[in-house]
Image: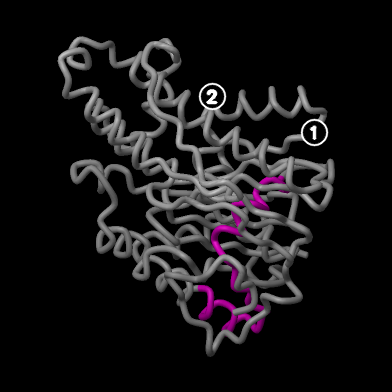
Amino acid sequence: MLLLGIETSCDDTATAIVRDGRTVLSSVSTNQDEFHAKYGGIVPEIASRQHVALLSAAVDDAVGRANLTLDAIDGIAVTRGPGLIGSLVVGVAAAKALAFALEKPLYAVNHLHGHIFAAFLDRDEPIPFPFLALLVSGGHSQLVDVRSPIDLHVIGRTRDDAAGEAYDKTARLLGLGYPGGPQLDRLAREGNPKAHAFPRHRPDPGTLDLSFSGLKTSVRYFLESDEGKLAKREDVAASFQAAVVDVLLARVSRAFEGGKYNAVVLSGGVAANSALQGAIREWSQRNSIPAFIPPPKYCTDNAAMIAAAAYFQRDVVDVDPLTLSADPNLPFEIIAA
């Protein structure tokens, strides 16, 4: 089954051709960093206009790289939400038009489900259900109980800043460029993670929820202090990163204490972080629990993950191209459009 994936939930214009939810025949992604860098963050209006300018060529590029024609595609998979409404509308409108014109099935995918199914891409080894997914990105930090491709439930979520958001804001405090998360990760590799004792959020008993706003604020106050003004940026970055990783790893450990899972999946943009990947792999080896992490190119927003999710959820996400609408606040547990 060949699916054309379209992903425009934020500022990446992405398309892909995926066979049977696993084999990526092509994956095209154009980021808009140069358009948003001077603002220090994503400007929704600019993002949506760039999608309009780029998407048609991106579809042609993905089909061409797969050495196919549009007629050979078995269906269209598109991100319905959550995300920026202007960006989502561009992708959904294009997918609806293609599905209608080509008389192909249309599959509406939850963007966050896509991140989880990114772990299935370019992998022969099956991921055993049920598994625990740790989904960490710029806008979301969640622990997800994944019983089957269509039985997914959030068991822990951020109460304020997501991990990726905290990375970007802390990177800005350190004077790093945009996007800040990857730059902070690189700087942290040169620092001492034990140089500064930043706080680790401890949730109320019985919850797996996350919080990173206090950590970000602690870094800010430290940098404004006399000690912080003399501190090495790489040590601050490393100490901040160590706090984030410790919190996430503690939640994963607690989740496994409370539930029976056959594996752990790390996904989302922050899954590309070197320290977090290393900590998850070390924890999995120590506890004899398989860990699955997508390659870095599938951690950030991409269309291959949307096609993968559509394939595994195809029986419940098949929608009418005439009635589908984008939903910027699409709840995680809602699968069928």
Residue pictured at 40% horizontal, 28% vertical: 199
| Residue that sits furthest to the front in the current view | 205
Q: Relative to 111, is 37 on the left or the right?
A: left
Rendered-image quadrant of the N terminus: bottom right
Label disc, if present, on residue 49 of the rendered structure = none
**Which comes before the other along the chain, label 2 or label 1?**
2
Q: Start and end of the magenta stretch?
A: 95-121
Looking at the picture, how far across and down is residue 85, in whole percent?
37, 70
Q: Residue at x 82, y 52 (%)?
A: 129
The residue singled out by tag 2 in the image is 275
Question: Which residue does the image show at 52% across and 34% down from the upper left?
Answer: 247
Give the answer, above or below, for where 258 lies relative to 320. above
The quadrant in which the C terminus is found is bottom right
Is 290 one of the magenta-colored residues? Answer: no
Q: Amino acid at mark 1?
A: Ile
Q: Position of residue 184 (x, y in %)?
A: 37, 26
The correct choice, above or below, for 30 with respect to 230 in the image is below
- Pointer 2 with pointer 1, Cβ within 8 A: no
Q: CA distance from mark 2 to mark 1?
A: 19 Å
**Secondary structure under badge 2?**
helix
Magenta stretch containing residue 96, yes or no? yes
Which of the pair 225/95 is nearer the observer? 225
Q: Position of residue 40 (x, y in %)?
A: 23, 42
Pick the front one: 226 or 141: 226
Badge 2: few (under 14), some or many (20 or more) residues near its Cα, within 10 Å?
some
Q: Which mark is residue 289?
A: 1
Is residue 334 in view?
A: yes
Rendering coords of residue 246 (x, y %): 53, 28
